[in-house]
Image (cartoon, grey):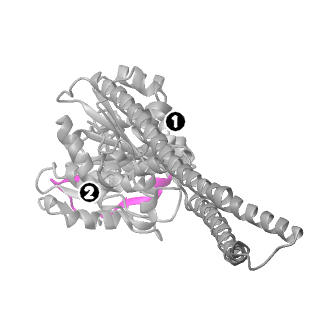
Protein backbone atom coordinates (compact mmCIF):
# COMPACT_ATOMS: atom_id res chain seq x y z
CA UNK A 1 0.00 0.00 0.00
CA UNK A 2 1.49 3.35 -1.06
CA UNK A 3 1.18 6.45 1.08
CA UNK A 4 -1.27 9.04 -0.22
CA UNK A 5 1.04 11.90 0.73
CA UNK A 6 4.71 10.96 0.69
CA UNK A 7 5.72 14.46 1.83
CA UNK A 8 3.43 16.10 4.36
CA UNK A 9 2.75 19.83 4.66
CA UNK A 10 4.60 19.89 7.98
CA UNK A 11 7.68 18.33 6.43
CA UNK A 12 7.60 20.80 3.53
CA UNK A 13 7.37 23.69 5.99
CA UNK A 14 10.33 22.29 7.96
CA UNK A 15 12.42 22.01 4.80
CA UNK A 16 11.59 25.56 3.69
CA UNK A 17 12.57 26.84 7.11
CA UNK A 18 15.82 24.87 7.00
CA UNK A 19 16.67 26.21 3.51
CA UNK A 20 16.16 29.82 4.58
CA UNK A 21 13.00 30.54 2.64
CA UNK A 22 12.23 34.15 1.63
CA UNK A 23 10.70 35.18 4.92
CA UNK A 24 8.80 38.49 5.32
CA UNK A 25 11.84 39.85 7.21
CA UNK A 26 14.24 39.04 4.36
CA UNK A 27 11.79 40.35 1.83
CA UNK A 28 11.52 43.65 3.73
CA UNK A 29 15.32 43.90 3.97
CA UNK A 30 15.73 43.55 0.21
CA UNK A 31 13.08 46.19 -0.41
CA UNK A 32 14.68 48.53 2.10
CA UNK A 33 18.08 48.17 0.43
CA UNK A 34 16.58 48.88 -2.97
CA UNK A 35 14.69 51.91 -1.68
CA UNK A 36 17.96 53.30 -0.29
CA UNK A 37 19.72 52.81 -3.63
CA UNK A 38 16.83 54.40 -5.54
CA UNK A 39 16.90 57.38 -3.16
CA UNK A 40 20.65 57.83 -3.67
CA UNK A 41 20.26 57.74 -7.45
CA UNK A 42 17.40 60.22 -7.29
CA UNK A 43 19.47 62.56 -5.13
CA UNK A 44 22.42 62.45 -7.55
CA UNK A 45 20.16 63.16 -10.50
CA UNK A 46 18.63 66.08 -8.63
CA UNK A 47 22.13 67.46 -7.92
CA UNK A 48 23.04 67.14 -11.60
CA UNK A 49 19.88 68.85 -12.67
CA UNK A 50 20.38 71.73 -10.23
CA UNK A 51 24.05 72.15 -11.17
CA UNK A 52 23.28 72.17 -14.85
CA UNK A 53 20.51 74.65 -14.29
CA UNK A 54 22.88 77.03 -12.50
CA UNK A 55 25.93 76.70 -14.76
CA UNK A 56 24.21 76.79 -18.16
CA UNK A 57 23.36 80.60 -18.11
CA UNK A 58 26.91 81.48 -17.07
CA UNK A 59 28.40 79.48 -19.91
CA UNK A 60 26.07 81.16 -22.40
CA UNK A 61 27.12 84.62 -21.16
CA UNK A 62 30.82 83.76 -21.38
CA UNK A 63 30.39 82.31 -24.86
CA UNK A 64 28.57 85.44 -26.08
CA UNK A 65 31.41 87.63 -24.76
CA UNK A 66 29.06 89.70 -22.67
CA UNK A 67 31.05 89.07 -19.49
CA UNK A 68 34.65 88.42 -18.63
CA UNK A 69 35.77 86.17 -15.76
CA UNK A 70 38.73 86.58 -13.52
CA UNK A 71 41.23 83.70 -13.35
CA UNK A 72 39.77 82.64 -9.96
CA UNK A 73 36.20 82.60 -11.33
CA UNK A 74 37.32 80.60 -14.35
CA UNK A 75 38.97 78.07 -12.03
CA UNK A 76 35.77 77.67 -9.95
CA UNK A 77 33.69 77.26 -13.09
CA UNK A 78 35.99 74.53 -14.41
CA UNK A 79 35.78 72.71 -11.04
CA UNK A 80 31.95 72.88 -11.07
CA UNK A 81 31.85 71.62 -14.65
CA UNK A 82 34.14 68.74 -13.72
CA UNK A 83 31.90 67.84 -10.73
CA UNK A 84 28.79 67.84 -12.89
CA UNK A 85 30.54 65.71 -15.48
CA UNK A 86 31.50 63.23 -12.74
CA UNK A 87 27.86 63.09 -11.62
CA UNK A 88 26.63 62.47 -15.13
CA UNK A 89 29.29 60.03 -16.33
CA UNK A 90 30.21 58.11 -13.16
CA UNK A 91 28.19 58.54 -9.95
CA UNK A 92 24.73 58.23 -11.44
CA UNK A 93 25.64 55.20 -13.65
CA UNK A 94 27.27 53.56 -10.61
CA UNK A 95 24.06 54.03 -8.63
CA UNK A 96 22.10 52.39 -11.43
CA UNK A 97 24.55 49.48 -11.50
CA UNK A 98 24.12 48.96 -7.73
CA UNK A 99 20.34 48.88 -8.15
CA UNK A 100 20.54 46.27 -10.91
CA UNK A 101 23.04 44.25 -8.85
CA UNK A 102 20.75 44.20 -5.82
CA UNK A 103 17.81 43.19 -8.02
CA UNK A 104 19.86 40.33 -9.53
CA UNK A 105 20.93 39.28 -6.00
CA UNK A 106 17.28 39.15 -4.99
CA UNK A 107 16.38 37.08 -8.03
CA UNK A 108 19.33 34.71 -7.49
CA UNK A 109 18.41 34.29 -3.82
CA UNK A 110 14.83 33.41 -4.63
CA UNK A 111 15.89 30.99 -7.35
CA UNK A 112 18.58 29.46 -5.12
CA UNK A 113 16.14 28.90 -2.26
CA UNK A 114 13.63 27.35 -4.63
CA UNK A 115 16.23 25.00 -6.11
CA UNK A 116 17.51 24.07 -2.65
CA UNK A 117 13.98 23.36 -1.40
CA UNK A 118 13.21 21.26 -4.46
CA UNK A 119 16.40 19.26 -3.91
CA UNK A 120 15.60 18.72 -0.22
CA UNK A 121 12.05 17.66 -1.08
CA UNK A 122 13.35 15.31 -3.75
CA UNK A 123 15.84 13.77 -1.31
CA UNK A 124 13.09 13.38 1.32
CA UNK A 125 10.75 11.72 -1.17
CA UNK A 126 13.49 9.29 -2.21
CA UNK A 127 14.19 8.51 1.45
CA UNK A 128 10.51 7.93 2.13
CA UNK A 129 10.22 5.68 -0.90
CA UNK A 130 13.13 3.64 0.41
CA UNK A 131 11.39 3.27 3.78
CA UNK A 132 8.16 2.32 2.02
CA UNK A 133 10.10 -0.42 0.24
CA UNK A 134 11.36 -1.63 3.61
CA UNK A 135 7.77 -1.55 4.91
CA UNK A 136 6.55 -3.53 1.91
CA UNK A 137 9.40 -5.99 2.30
CA UNK A 138 8.52 -6.51 5.97
CA UNK A 139 4.89 -7.08 5.03
CA UNK A 140 5.90 -9.44 2.24
CA UNK A 141 7.49 -11.77 4.79
CA UNK A 142 4.10 -12.38 6.39
CA UNK A 143 2.10 -15.28 5.03
CA UNK A 144 -1.61 -14.96 4.37
CA UNK A 145 -3.77 -15.33 7.44
CA UNK A 146 -5.25 -18.74 8.01
CA UNK A 147 -8.76 -19.42 9.21
CA UNK A 148 -7.84 -19.50 12.92
CA UNK A 149 -5.23 -16.74 12.89
CA UNK A 150 -5.59 -13.55 14.91
CA UNK A 151 -4.43 -10.11 13.72
CA UNK A 152 -2.93 -8.29 16.70
CA UNK A 153 -2.97 -4.59 15.77
CA UNK A 154 -0.93 -2.03 17.71
CA UNK A 155 -2.46 1.45 17.25
CA UNK A 156 0.04 4.05 18.48
CA UNK A 157 -1.24 7.62 18.70
CA UNK A 158 1.57 9.22 20.71
CA UNK A 159 4.48 10.68 18.73
CA UNK A 160 6.58 11.82 21.69
CA UNK A 161 7.78 8.93 23.87
CA UNK A 162 5.38 6.33 22.37
CA UNK A 163 5.58 3.89 25.29
CA UNK A 164 3.64 1.21 23.44
CA UNK A 165 6.53 0.94 20.98
CA UNK A 166 9.31 1.77 23.43
CA UNK A 167 8.20 -0.92 25.90
CA UNK A 168 8.36 -3.58 23.20
CA UNK A 169 11.51 -4.82 21.51
CA UNK A 170 12.34 -6.92 18.50
CA UNK A 171 13.42 -9.91 20.59
CA UNK A 172 10.13 -9.89 22.47
CA UNK A 173 8.08 -9.67 19.27
CA UNK A 174 10.14 -12.42 17.64
CA UNK A 175 9.51 -14.67 20.63
CA UNK A 176 5.82 -13.83 20.51
CA UNK A 177 5.60 -14.88 16.86
CA UNK A 178 7.72 -17.99 17.44
CA UNK A 179 5.59 -19.26 20.34
CA UNK A 180 2.29 -18.19 18.78
CA UNK A 181 2.43 -18.79 15.00
CA UNK A 182 -1.27 -18.02 14.66
CA UNK A 183 -0.81 -14.47 15.99
CA UNK A 184 -0.12 -12.09 13.12
CA UNK A 185 1.14 -8.56 13.72
CA UNK A 186 0.08 -5.16 12.46
CA UNK A 187 0.84 -1.58 13.49
CA UNK A 188 -0.77 1.79 12.80
CA UNK A 189 1.13 4.79 14.13
CA UNK A 190 0.98 8.56 14.11
CA UNK A 191 4.69 8.51 13.26
CA UNK A 192 5.50 8.83 9.56
CA UNK A 193 6.59 5.64 7.83
CA UNK A 194 10.05 7.20 7.53
CA UNK A 195 10.33 7.85 11.28
CA UNK A 196 8.78 4.51 12.18
CA UNK A 197 11.13 2.49 9.97
CA UNK A 198 14.11 4.58 11.06
CA UNK A 199 13.53 4.79 14.83
CA UNK A 200 12.30 1.21 15.21
CA UNK A 201 14.14 -0.47 12.33
CA UNK A 202 14.96 -3.56 14.40
CA UNK A 203 11.23 -4.33 14.61
CA UNK A 204 10.97 -4.78 10.85
CA UNK A 205 14.19 -6.47 9.75
CA UNK A 206 13.49 -9.97 11.03
CA UNK A 207 9.83 -9.92 12.02
CA UNK A 208 7.02 -10.58 9.57
CA UNK A 209 4.23 -8.00 9.67
CA UNK A 210 0.88 -8.27 7.91
CA UNK A 211 0.14 -4.55 8.09
CA UNK A 212 2.35 -1.49 8.67
CA UNK A 213 0.49 1.79 8.36
CA UNK A 214 0.86 5.46 9.27
CA UNK A 215 -1.92 7.89 10.12
CA UNK A 216 -0.72 9.93 7.11
CA UNK A 217 -1.90 7.09 4.85
CA UNK A 218 -5.48 8.07 5.58
CA UNK A 219 -7.68 11.10 5.04
CA UNK A 220 -7.50 13.71 7.82
CA UNK A 221 -4.52 11.75 9.25
CA UNK A 222 -6.65 10.03 11.88
CA UNK A 223 -7.96 6.54 12.51
CA UNK A 224 -11.67 5.87 12.19
CA UNK A 225 -13.89 2.84 11.82
CA UNK A 226 -13.49 3.07 8.03
CA UNK A 227 -9.71 2.77 8.47
CA UNK A 228 -10.02 -0.57 10.23
CA UNK A 229 -12.63 -1.64 7.70
CA UNK A 230 -10.21 -0.88 4.84
CA UNK A 231 -7.47 -2.96 6.51
CA UNK A 232 -9.93 -5.81 7.06
CA UNK A 233 -10.92 -5.67 3.39
CA UNK A 234 -7.33 -5.40 2.18
CA UNK A 235 -6.14 -8.38 4.22
CA UNK A 236 -9.41 -10.26 3.81
CA UNK A 237 -9.69 -10.55 7.59
CA UNK A 238 -13.11 -10.49 9.32
CA UNK A 239 -13.52 -8.07 12.19
CA UNK A 240 -13.91 -10.83 14.77
CA UNK A 241 -10.24 -11.75 14.24
CA UNK A 242 -8.98 -8.26 15.06
CA UNK A 243 -7.46 -7.58 18.47
CA UNK A 244 -6.31 -4.04 19.23
CA UNK A 245 -3.82 -2.67 21.74
CA UNK A 246 -3.68 1.13 21.77
CA UNK A 247 -2.36 4.03 23.83
CA UNK A 248 -5.41 6.08 22.82
CA UNK A 249 -8.64 6.05 24.84
CA UNK A 250 -10.46 7.32 21.75
CA UNK A 251 -9.25 4.34 19.71
CA UNK A 252 -10.19 2.03 22.60
CA UNK A 253 -13.71 3.46 22.72
CA UNK A 254 -14.13 3.17 18.94
CA UNK A 255 -12.87 -0.44 18.95
CA UNK A 256 -15.26 -1.39 21.74
CA UNK A 257 -18.20 0.17 19.89
CA UNK A 258 -17.30 -1.96 16.86
CA UNK A 259 -17.33 -5.10 19.01
CA UNK A 260 -13.57 -5.59 18.67
CA UNK A 261 -11.51 -7.04 21.47
CA UNK A 262 -9.27 -4.21 22.60
CA UNK A 263 -7.06 -3.18 25.47
CA UNK A 264 -5.53 0.10 26.62
CA UNK A 265 -1.75 0.38 27.01
CA UNK A 266 -1.27 2.56 30.07
CA UNK A 267 -2.25 2.58 33.72
CA UNK A 268 -5.36 2.85 35.90
CA UNK A 269 -4.93 6.61 36.28
CA UNK A 270 -6.00 6.97 32.67
CA UNK A 271 -8.83 4.47 32.35
CA UNK A 272 -11.81 3.75 34.61
CA UNK A 273 -13.29 0.69 32.99
CA UNK A 274 -12.23 -1.96 30.54
CA UNK A 275 -9.03 -3.90 30.14
CA UNK A 276 -5.57 -2.39 30.25
CA UNK A 277 -1.99 -3.42 30.85
CA UNK A 278 1.55 -2.17 30.28
CA UNK A 279 3.55 -5.38 30.53
CA UNK A 280 4.79 -6.83 27.20
CA UNK A 281 4.90 -10.32 28.70
CA UNK A 282 1.11 -10.26 29.05
CA UNK A 283 0.36 -9.60 25.40
CA UNK A 284 0.35 -13.29 24.45
CA UNK A 285 -1.73 -14.15 27.52
CA UNK A 286 -4.26 -11.47 26.59
CA UNK A 287 -4.51 -12.75 23.01
CA UNK A 288 -4.75 -16.36 24.10
CA UNK A 289 -7.25 -16.11 26.93
CA UNK A 290 -10.57 -16.51 25.04
CA UNK A 291 -9.97 -20.25 24.79
CA UNK A 292 -7.52 -20.93 27.63
CA UNK A 293 -6.79 -18.31 30.25
CA UNK A 294 -10.01 -16.33 30.70
CA UNK A 295 -13.23 -17.55 32.26
CA UNK A 296 -16.65 -16.48 30.89
CA UNK A 297 -17.40 -13.53 33.19
CA UNK A 298 -13.87 -12.17 32.81
CA UNK A 299 -14.41 -12.04 29.07
CA UNK A 300 -17.85 -10.49 29.50
CA UNK A 301 -16.52 -7.68 31.71
CA UNK A 302 -13.42 -7.09 29.56
CA UNK A 303 -15.21 -7.00 26.22
CA UNK A 304 -18.44 -5.38 27.46
CA UNK A 305 -20.29 -8.30 25.91
CA UNK A 306 -20.55 -12.05 26.51
CA UNK A 307 -17.77 -14.22 25.10
CA UNK A 308 -17.70 -17.98 25.33
CA UNK A 309 -15.07 -19.41 27.61
CA UNK A 310 -14.51 -22.57 29.61
CA UNK A 311 -16.02 -22.77 33.07
CA UNK A 312 -13.93 -24.08 35.91
CA UNK A 313 -15.00 -26.67 38.46
CA UNK A 314 -13.67 -26.46 42.00
CA UNK A 315 -14.38 -29.48 44.22
CA UNK A 316 -16.04 -28.99 47.59
CA UNK A 317 -17.64 -31.15 50.24
CA UNK A 318 -20.76 -31.96 48.17
CA UNK A 319 -19.46 -32.03 44.61
CA UNK A 320 -18.17 -29.23 42.42
CA UNK A 321 -18.63 -25.46 42.43
CA UNK A 322 -19.04 -23.91 38.97
CA UNK A 323 -16.51 -21.05 38.75
CA UNK A 324 -17.14 -18.31 36.16
CA UNK A 325 -14.14 -16.06 36.82
CA UNK A 326 -11.03 -15.36 38.87
CA UNK A 327 -10.71 -12.93 41.77
CA UNK A 328 -7.33 -11.34 42.48
CA UNK A 329 -6.90 -9.66 45.86
CA UNK A 330 -6.60 -5.88 45.98
CA UNK A 331 -2.94 -5.82 46.90
CA UNK A 332 -1.89 -8.22 44.15
CA UNK A 333 -0.23 -7.03 40.94
CA UNK A 334 -2.82 -8.87 38.83
CA UNK A 335 -5.67 -6.93 40.45
CA UNK A 336 -4.42 -3.75 38.78
CA UNK A 337 -3.61 -5.38 35.46
CA UNK A 338 -5.82 -6.72 32.71
CA UNK A 339 -6.45 -9.96 34.62
CA UNK A 340 -8.13 -7.99 37.39
CA UNK A 341 -10.99 -6.55 35.33
CA UNK A 342 -13.56 -8.85 36.93
CA UNK A 343 -11.98 -8.45 40.37
CA UNK A 344 -12.35 -4.67 40.24
CA UNK A 345 -15.89 -5.07 38.91
CA UNK A 346 -16.89 -7.28 41.88
CA UNK A 347 -15.50 -4.77 44.38
CA UNK A 348 -17.40 -1.89 42.74
CA UNK A 349 -20.57 -3.98 42.84
CA UNK A 350 -20.52 -3.91 46.66
CA UNK A 351 -21.56 -0.28 46.47
CA UNK A 352 -23.02 0.18 42.99
CA UNK A 353 -24.35 -3.17 41.80
CA UNK A 354 -23.34 -5.31 38.85
CA UNK A 355 -22.84 -3.88 35.33
CA UNK A 356 -25.05 -5.00 32.43
CA UNK A 357 -22.25 -6.94 30.73
CA UNK A 358 -21.77 -9.18 33.80
CA UNK A 359 -25.51 -9.76 34.11
CA UNK A 360 -25.74 -10.61 30.41
CA UNK A 361 -22.78 -12.99 30.69
CA UNK A 362 -24.30 -14.73 33.71
CA UNK A 363 -27.65 -15.00 31.91
CA UNK A 364 -25.97 -16.75 28.95
CA UNK A 365 -24.75 -19.43 31.35
CA UNK A 366 -27.93 -19.80 33.44
CA UNK A 367 -30.22 -20.19 30.43
CA UNK A 368 -28.79 -23.69 29.90
CA UNK A 369 -30.55 -24.95 33.04
CA UNK A 370 -33.80 -26.81 32.52
CA UNK A 371 -37.26 -25.28 32.71
CA UNK A 372 -38.58 -24.71 36.23
CA UNK A 373 -35.15 -24.55 37.87
CA UNK A 374 -35.04 -22.11 40.78
CA UNK A 375 -32.31 -19.46 40.80
CA UNK A 376 -31.36 -17.97 44.18
CA UNK A 377 -28.32 -16.32 45.72
CA UNK A 378 -26.36 -16.14 48.94
CA UNK A 379 -28.23 -13.40 50.88
CA UNK A 380 -26.73 -9.95 51.47
CA UNK A 381 -25.46 -9.27 54.98
CA UNK A 382 -27.52 -7.03 57.22
CA UNK A 383 -26.97 -3.32 56.61
CA UNK A 384 -25.07 -3.90 53.37
CA UNK A 385 -25.97 -2.84 49.83
CA UNK A 386 -28.39 -5.44 48.45
CA UNK A 387 -26.32 -6.33 45.40
CA UNK A 388 -27.31 -10.02 45.29
CA UNK A 389 -31.01 -9.19 45.55
CA UNK A 390 -30.65 -6.66 42.74
CA UNK A 391 -28.71 -9.23 40.71
CA UNK A 392 -31.59 -11.71 40.96
CA UNK A 393 -34.07 -8.97 40.03
CA UNK A 394 -32.03 -8.04 36.93
CA UNK A 395 -31.74 -11.68 35.87
CA UNK A 396 -35.48 -12.18 36.28
CA UNK A 397 -36.11 -9.39 33.74
CA UNK A 398 -33.95 -11.10 31.14
CA UNK A 399 -36.25 -12.63 28.50
CA UNK A 400 -33.77 -15.44 27.78
CA UNK A 401 -34.39 -16.71 31.34
CA UNK A 402 -38.18 -16.74 31.17
CA UNK A 403 -38.20 -20.53 31.66
CA UNK A 404 -36.52 -20.20 35.09
CA UNK A 405 -37.88 -19.23 38.51
CA UNK A 406 -36.21 -16.65 40.78
CA UNK A 407 -36.39 -16.12 44.53
CA UNK A 408 -34.32 -14.38 47.23
CA UNK A 409 -36.33 -15.93 50.10
CA UNK A 410 -34.83 -19.38 50.46
CA UNK A 411 -31.95 -18.32 52.69
CA UNK A 412 -31.31 -15.75 55.39
CA UNK A 413 -28.16 -14.46 57.03
CA UNK A 414 -27.87 -12.61 60.31
CA UNK A 415 -25.26 -10.11 61.35
CA UNK A 416 -22.70 -7.96 59.57
CA UNK A 417 -19.30 -9.63 59.67
CA UNK A 418 -16.17 -10.17 57.59
CA UNK A 419 -14.72 -13.52 56.61
CA UNK A 420 -11.58 -12.27 54.87
CA UNK A 421 -9.28 -12.56 57.89
CA UNK A 422 -10.58 -15.97 59.05
CA UNK A 423 -9.11 -19.36 58.19
CA UNK A 424 -11.23 -22.13 56.70
CA UNK A 425 -12.31 -23.64 60.02
CA UNK A 426 -13.23 -20.25 61.47
CA UNK A 427 -15.13 -19.36 58.31
CA UNK A 428 -17.17 -22.56 58.46
CA UNK A 429 -18.06 -21.97 62.07
CA UNK A 430 -19.06 -18.35 61.51
CA UNK A 431 -21.14 -18.95 58.40
CA UNK A 432 -22.88 -22.00 59.93
CA UNK A 433 -23.96 -19.81 62.84
CA UNK A 434 -25.18 -16.95 60.62
CA UNK A 435 -26.86 -18.60 57.59
CA UNK A 436 -30.11 -20.59 57.76
CA UNK A 437 -32.92 -21.74 55.47
CA UNK A 438 -36.40 -20.18 55.63
CA UNK A 439 -38.22 -23.51 55.82
CA UNK A 440 -39.50 -23.17 52.26
CA UNK A 441 -40.70 -26.47 50.77
CA UNK A 442 -38.34 -27.23 47.88
CA UNK A 443 -39.35 -30.86 47.43
CA UNK A 444 -38.52 -32.19 43.97
CA UNK A 445 -36.99 -28.83 43.00
CA UNK A 446 -33.73 -28.14 41.22
CA UNK A 447 -31.96 -25.07 42.60
CA UNK A 448 -28.99 -22.95 41.50
CA UNK A 449 -27.41 -20.85 44.26
CA UNK A 450 -25.07 -17.98 43.32
CA UNK A 451 -22.28 -16.42 45.37
CA UNK A 452 -20.06 -13.55 44.28
CA UNK A 453 -16.59 -14.62 45.47
CA UNK A 454 -15.64 -18.14 46.51
CA UNK A 455 -12.48 -18.48 48.58
CA UNK A 456 -12.71 -21.63 50.70
CA UNK A 457 -16.21 -22.67 49.60
CA UNK A 458 -17.59 -22.41 53.15
CA UNK A 459 -20.46 -20.07 52.21
CA UNK A 460 -21.67 -22.18 49.29
CA UNK A 461 -21.26 -25.36 51.35
CA UNK A 462 -23.60 -23.94 53.99
CA UNK A 463 -26.04 -22.69 51.33
CA UNK A 464 -26.06 -26.14 49.70
CA UNK A 465 -26.83 -27.84 53.01
CA UNK A 466 -29.64 -25.41 53.88
CA UNK A 467 -31.30 -25.86 50.47
CA UNK A 468 -31.00 -29.65 50.63
CA UNK A 469 -32.53 -29.57 54.13
CA UNK A 470 -35.54 -27.77 52.63
CA UNK A 471 -36.04 -30.65 50.21
CA UNK A 472 -34.22 -29.60 47.02
CA UNK A 473 -33.43 -32.59 44.80
CA UNK A 474 -30.40 -31.07 43.07
CA UNK A 475 -28.43 -28.00 44.14
CA UNK A 476 -25.92 -26.40 41.76
CA UNK A 477 -23.41 -24.00 43.33
CA UNK A 478 -22.16 -21.16 41.12
CA UNK A 479 -19.51 -18.56 42.03
CA UNK A 480 -18.95 -15.43 39.95
CA UNK A 481 -15.27 -15.70 40.83
CA UNK A 482 -12.80 -17.87 42.70
CA UNK A 483 -10.07 -16.25 44.79
CA UNK A 484 -6.60 -16.84 43.31
Tell me the mark number nearer the camera, choosing from 2 and 1: 1
**How many other residues sit within 10 Å of disc 1, few (<14), some (14-19) or many (≥20)?**
few
Q: Which residue is mark 1?
A: 167
**How many other residues sit within 10 Å of disc 2, few (<14), some (14-19) or many (≥20)?**
some
Earlier along the polypeptide chain: callout 2 or callout 1?
1
Where 76 falls versus 15 (above or below)? below
Q: Which residues are magenta?
A: 430-447
Q: Residue at x 69, y 78 (%)?
A: 57
Where 333 falls versus 466 (above or below)? above
Q: Residue at x 73, y 75 (%)?
A: 65
Q: Nearer the viewer, residue 341 or 110?
A: 110
The circle drawn on residue 141 is none
Q: Which residue is mark 2?
A: 470
Q: SS at mark 2?
A: loop
Q: SS at mark 1?
A: loop
Compared across the picture, whether 425 is left or right of 450 comes to: right
Residue 67 pos. (x, y %): 78, 78
Residue 449 pos. (x, y %): 29, 53
Amino acid sequence: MESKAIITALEREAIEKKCGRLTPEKNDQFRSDLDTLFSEEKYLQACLKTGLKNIKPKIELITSGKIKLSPRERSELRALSKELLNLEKKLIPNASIKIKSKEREWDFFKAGVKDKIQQELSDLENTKNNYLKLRNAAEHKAKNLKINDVLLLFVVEKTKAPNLLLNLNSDHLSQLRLENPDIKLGVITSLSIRNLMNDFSSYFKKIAWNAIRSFEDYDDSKIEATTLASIAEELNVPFDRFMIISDSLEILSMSTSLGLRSSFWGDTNQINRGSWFNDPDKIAIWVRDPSKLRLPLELAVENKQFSSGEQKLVPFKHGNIIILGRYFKKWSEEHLQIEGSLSRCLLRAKGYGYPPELIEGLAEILQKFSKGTWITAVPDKEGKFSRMTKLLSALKKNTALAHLNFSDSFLTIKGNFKLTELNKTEREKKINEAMHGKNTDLSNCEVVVIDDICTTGSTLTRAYECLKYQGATNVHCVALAHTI
